Amino acid sequence: MGLFISENLPSLGCMKQIFRIALAPVFALALAVPAVADAIPLGQISNYLNGLTTVQSKFTQVNADGSISTGTVYIKRPGRARFEYDNDNTLVIAGGSQVGIFDGKSNLSRPEQYPLSKTPLKLILDRNVNLAQSGMVTNHREDGAKTIVTAQDPAHPEYGNIQMVFTAQPTELRQWVVTDDTGAKTTVILGDLQKGGTMGASLFSIKTEQIKRGG
């Protein structure tokens, strides 16, 4: 009645064996591919950075020459940061639209100064961080449990870039790597972030620090 059984067809047992052999590579491939977490969306990262007001954290810094420094960083957004180094009189202050670097190994009380707008650190300290802005983000990817975002000033890519590393649930900034206009890289690895609290304006005043040092 239209149902034909060919003598050339394999038995049921043989067919099961064929399916097991055929599907084995598929299952092996599925097991070999690790679970991939989604990268944290850029809008969510922007909101996180904009929500930071005052932050204090221990940090470890890997310098361009491979040397390692440690210290405490204070951040007061927008536009202000202070890096105090352990066992060293070196100090970096961002404030008043300038970055001042006080060399702990020099007798000079006057710091080297640069416009904050010409440093990649500006991208974290801006009043309104918008990573969705055209040309700002050059790389956005997940790496295991981390999301890595590389950003630059879209109007001045020649100023360098900053690569930020975030963990999720909740979103948290864990480290950044600044590549300056010469290509030198400085990595800052953050400890636990202490958020909130009061930080006086003098903490971020280059002029106040200069007077304190006799300048």
Image: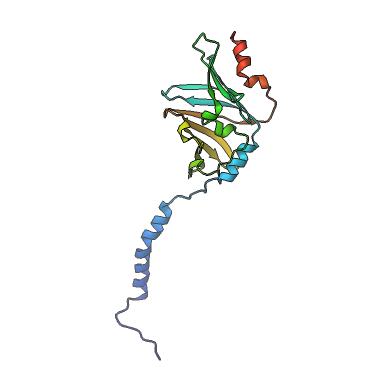
Picture coordinates of residue 149 (x, y %)? 50, 40
Give me the residue at 62% from left, 41% from top.
47
Q: Can residue 213 be seen in this view?
A: yes
The furthest residue to the right: 198
The foreground one among 13 and 147 is 147
The furthest residue to the bottom: 1
Q: What quarter of the picture does the C terminus occupy?
A: top right
Q: Is residue 95 left or right of residue 88?
A: right
Q: Is residue 42 left or right of residue 64?
A: right
Picture coordinates of residue 98 (x, y %)? 57, 23
Say which quarter of the image contains residue 117: top right
Q: Is residue 170 visible?
A: no
Picture coordinates of residue 44 (x, y %)? 60, 44
Give me the residue at 49% from left, 25% from top.
61
The foreground one among 71 and 151 is 151
The furthest residue to the front: 155
Give me the residue at 61% from left, 31% from top.
193
Say which quarter of the image contains residue 15: bottom left
